[in-house]
Amino acid sequence: MKIVKAYKYKLKTNKNIEEKFRQIAGCCRFVYNLFLAQKIQEYRTDFVMPNYYDQAVQLPLLKEEYPWLKEAPSQVLQQALKDLEQAYKNFFRRVKSGGVPGFPKFRKKGVHDSFRYPQGIKIEGSRIYLPKAGWVSFHKSRSIQGEIKNVTVSESASGWYVSIQTEQDVPDVVHSSNTAVGVDVGVRVFAALSDGTTYMPVNNLKKLEKKLTKVQRDLSRKKKGSNNFKKNAKKLALMHERIKNTRMDYLHKVSTEISKNHAVVVLENLKISNMSRSAKGTVESPGENVKAKAGLNKSILNQGWGMFRNMIEYKTKHSGGNIILVDPRYTSQTCHNCGYTSKENRKTQSHFHCTVCGYELNADINAAKNILAVGLTVSACGAAASAAQ
Ligand SMILES: [Zn+2]
């Protein structure tokens, strides 16, 4: 079995190295934006959209016109073009699934500056060789295993990081457990399992978010461009990063636990677009807590669910388990006891009370039980083989 892993380390940079990083990131941004404009323009005039290959062949010419583009390795520029291609693919996928499309955006200077090497890098001890930037030391917190597939250098509020993606052949393992579990994800309860386990949304974020609002307010009072403004902006960016990291840690913790405990995990086949729609649905229905939360950071929540699902997926597979994806329709309105399906069964967000048989349960756990039941039915029919890919 092949497994893909990413190792992220903080780089030990200096002014000189950072300058080179910014140059390379700038070249990538330039190429990305220029070709995005080209895609838009050609589509407007001729209704054709140049693809990656159409654009990649233009790179050498572009370098003659803008010699400073040679500051960046050719392959890194090609990767920027691949990112653009991917952004378009994502866009069309969202259009097809009826979600909020979100057209590819132009990249801005200083916002998520990053670039990716598909090859040409070397690692010696805790130093990495990045073409056109040179040798850079990094904080090696754990050893790298597998064959290096690509390397991304990115800037965040706390500095520059390198993310090394590897692929490794590992022997197939047999999962140590033999249980199956259904997982329901939501806003009020982050994840509810069919065995009755619930994971609440990570709670120390509330405090952080409160502080964040305060810093944001302070920032709006400062004069733009002043030293105080810059100091505050930096503080804000660091807080955003901390919140993101806390969230990621939590997603990792919960997904590890679930994938270790169960050999088969049944998840709703939710597209992100559906997620935002259902979040909207919950806002409209009663439930104060949900209302506030969903309004707060809907997009981040959506993103979190997507990532969470991916994590469960790869972790379960790594430990020899299986994933089954099921149609999420009606799982929240159906009585797990008698099968009766109605909105009336769920007069409140948190509680499920069947109007036919009187079955009562935490609504999210009821949904998780339905998800498991659907998953096992699908599995028994053999249709899960493709779903579990
Ligand atoms: Zn019932």
Image (tube, grey):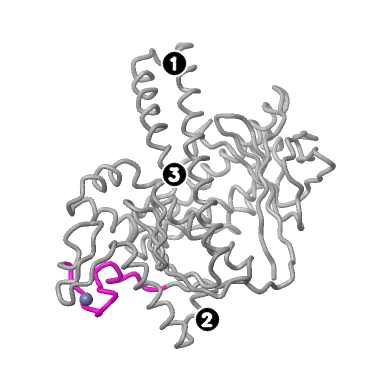
Residue that numbered label 2 is attached to = 385
**Could you tell whether 97 is left or right of 33 in the image?**
left
Frontmost residue, 149 versus 85: 149
Secondary structure type for disc 1: helix
Image location of residue 82, percent across then percent down = 58, 53
Range of magenta residues = 326-343
Where residue 220 appears, as percent x and y from the top left, is 35, 20
Please report whichever mark, 3 or 1, sits nearer to the chain's N-terminal start.
Answer: 3
Identify the amino acid type marked 3. Lys
Which residue has dot 3 on it?
105
Give the residue drawn at x 45%, y 26%. Answer: 236
Observer-side mark, 3 or 1, equals 1
**What's the CA distance linking mark 3 and mark 2?**
37 Å
Taking 19 as reference, is 196 left or right?
Answer: left
Which x, y percent locates residue 280? 25, 53
Are discs 3 and 2 less than 8 Å apart at CB?
A: no
At a point 48% along the width and 11% down the height, the residue shown is 227
* CB-based contact (under 8 Å), mark 1 and mark 2: no
Element type at mark 3: loop
- Position of residue 368 measured from the top left corner of the image (x, y, whole percent): 37, 67
Q: Earlier in the sequence, mark 3 or mark 2?
A: 3
**Image quadrant in which you'd find residue 171:** bottom right
Describe the element under mark 2 as helix, strand or loop: helix
Amino acid beneath label 1: Phe
Q: Is the magenta stretch mostly helix, strand or loop?
A: loop
Q: What residue type is labelled 2?
A: Ala
Residue 295 in view here: yes
Residue situated in front as seen by the camera: 135 or 364: 364
